[in-house]
Amino acid sequence: MNARPKKSFGQHFLHDRRYIERIVDVIAPRSEDFVVEIGPGEGALTLPLLAAAGKLTAIELDTDLIPGLQARAAGKGELHIVHADVLKVDFTAMAHSHGVQRLRVAGNLPYYISSPILFHCVEHAAAIQDMHFMLQKEVVDRMAAEPGSKVYGRLSVMLQLACRVEPLFNVPPEAFRPPPKVESSVVRLLPLASHELHDARPQDVYAVVKAAFGQRRKTLANALKQLLDSDAIRRADVDPKARAETLSPTDFVRLAKVYASRE
Ligand code: SAM
């Protein structure tokens, strides 16, 4: 009945019921929610989520898993399986086409593409109510890191400018089949309301953040020299002698705005 997990799809199936229950509890799906699961696999989370919400849309890339999932879900609710790469799924269009304001997104993510999935969801954050993801603990630590921390970087800044990041609890390797090599963690992401969002263009923020952390040991004057000179950095109210890891996400927004007005 159970498929052999495929490494190439990042398949680590959750089997420990205690953690499955904890995840479903923190999501707390209700019948009025439009829940979307990324990577349902064999249905460890899908079936309890479906039982709680009554309906669920699941996005799975591995064709081999789909018949088993359909069979397990039969009679348990309305399961709609989308056979696709989640990175190609337009969440905003999905919400519109179902006449819902915002989706609730969840999943035990395939770790090999966790950062691209996070960035993809952030792009569609206006169409998302909340996200609950299982990720490598190290990734959750980076997402939630504050300025000054060793792991504060690109992911921290980009995610914190779009969402509130709430690490929830850790999950040990033994809870999965096969066990991953690393500790995992469940995190909640709450997209910021429109009035809380900054008004810099994401591509400008990304350009500045990427350059700044690309050479995190250098001063900003050095790390950003292809993008901004010291006077421009000062115009953003940032010290050119500072290092990227000491700047807050909003410091990067000001740098991005000066960068955008460079011509
Ligand atoms: N949710 C299941 C569980 O908790 O047992 C499976 C989790 S497993 C870590 C990740 C799942 O994501 C697998 O089912 C895998 O086939 C699927 N997956 C991998 N890459 C994907 C992609 N690009 N788009 C959608 N699903 C993908």
Image (cartoon, grey):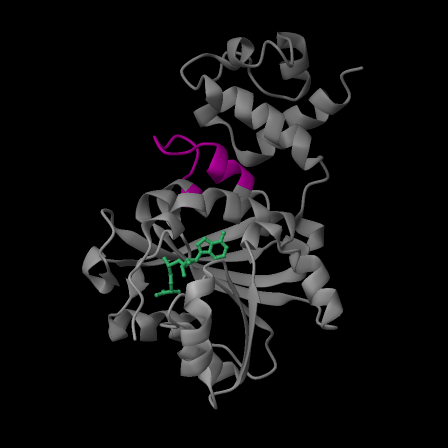
Magenta-drawn segment: 143-158
Q: Nearer the viewer, residue 73 or 140?
A: 73
Q: Nearer the viewer, residue 2 or 214?
A: 2
Q: Nearer the viewer, residue 49 or 200?
A: 49
Q: Who's the residue at 30% across and 66% down the image?
A: 14
Q: Quadrant of residue 145?
A: top left
Above or below 219: residue 160: below
**Residue that extends furthest to the left in the rendered view of this protein:** 174
**Residue that extends furthest to the right in the rendered view of this protein:** 263
Above or below 36: residue 182: above
Question: Is 126 situated left or right of 173 in this image?
Answer: right
Q: Who's the residue at 24% across and 70% down the image?
A: 16
Q: Quadrant of residue 139?
A: top left
Q: Quadrant of residue 186?
A: bottom left
Asked if the stretch drawn in magenta spans residue 240, the answer is no
Count the labels in the image: 0
Of the 4 image quadrants, the one containing the C terminus is top right
Q: Position of residue 259 (x, y in %)?
A: 70, 21
Q: Position of residue 26 (x, y in %)?
A: 41, 70
Above or below 225: residue 98: below
Q: Who's the residue at 30% across and 75% down the image?
A: 1
Question: Is 233 situated left or right of 131 in this image?
Answer: right
Asked if the stretch drawn in magenta spans residue 144, the answer is yes
Q: Quadrant of ligand 1?
A: bottom left
Q: Position of residue 188 (x, y in %)?
A: 46, 59
Q: Who's the residue at 52% across and 15% down the image?
A: 220
